[in-house]
Amino acid sequence: MAAVKPAELLRRHGLRAKKEWGQNFLGDDHLLGQLAALARVGPGDTVVELGAGLGHLTRALAATGARVIAVERDRELVPILREQLAGVEIVEADAKSFDLEAVGRPLVVCGNLPYHLSSPILFHLLDQRAALRRAVLLLQREVAERIAAPPGGRDYGLLSVLAQRVAEVNIALAVPRHAFTPPPEVESAALSLEFLDPPRARVDDEQRFRALVKAAFSHRRKTLWNSLRNFPEARTALERADIDPQRRAETLSVEEFAALERALP
């Protein structure tokens, strides 16, 4: 049986999309099938969907034969998911704090993320990446482009470095705004993260690495010498890592940032 379109499902239940929650529901069967295909899951796999919404992507993922765990924090939508999706485990929880490690490994994560929460959710996934094999995330196109950006341009930044150190990152699919209900004000794209084991570059301390990269990009127009002025021992580490302190953060590769962190005492 074909899935009911988002607008009709909302009308049936007397609901509206919550703008303040960034709810934009994707109901295009062709695009949903493409997103499920990008997850590359089947029988024997476990996929966690973050922000299941009305269950349209959930249904497409379940059709692959994989075990699907659908996470949704909106308590008004959880009963709709349970009504629409037999055989899918529905969990009322916040995607920003859902314990992926507790589900098991290796997992695949999918989700049409609320755009205003995409960064904290991404940081959460990076923190729990040991449990992950792959992630396919529907994001605002500009955010996806920043995460996938190579060094040297203004799009390259903190999330680019953190994600690309631990994953192969690619923009896999463009999704037009008119495919959503209601249509967002921006274009969207599906970002694919294929997690690496081991990571692309070794670091000694994950939290220190994140703090270092964040500090380096905190003043994009400044040189590393100035951006890292208040970061302990960073100037000495630049010399040890043979990195010119007059360079700017966006010119450093992931490997150079990792070398800089390892050079810290």
Image (cartoon, rainbow, N blue to C red):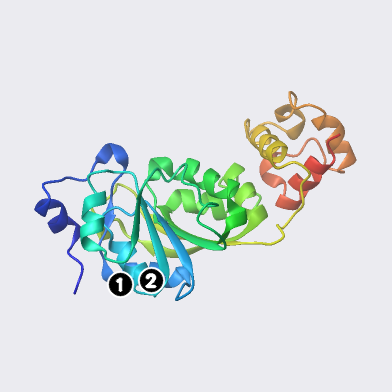
Label 2 to label 1: alpha-carbon separation? 6 Å
Q: Is residue 199 left or right of residue 90?
A: right
- Residue 206: name its quadrant: top right
Is 117 on the left or on the right of 206, as rendered?
A: left
Answer yes or no: is residue 170 visible. Answer: no
Report the disc number at residue 30: 1
Q: Could you tell me which residue is drawn at 80 percent across and 35 percent down?
A: 245
Q: Where is residue 120 in the image (x, y as percent from the top left)?
A: 49, 40
Q: Which of 15 and 143 is in front in this view?
A: 15
- CB under 8 Å between discs 2 and 1: yes
| Residue type highlighted by circle 2 | Gln
**Quadrant of the rendered image containing residue 174:** bottom left
Residue 97 placement (x, y as % from top left): 47, 42
Q: In this view, does 201 lie to the left or right of 4?
A: right
Q: 204 and 169: which one is in front?
A: 204
- The tag on residue 169 is none
Identify the residue under disc 2. 34
Amino acid type shown at disc 1 = His
Quadrant assignment for the C terminus = top right
Mark 1 falls on what kind of element?
helix
Q: Please tell me which residue is depicted at 30% across the width and 72% down the height of the picture.
A: 30
> Can residue 34 be seen here?
yes
Residue shown at the point (29%, 56%) measured from the top left: 177
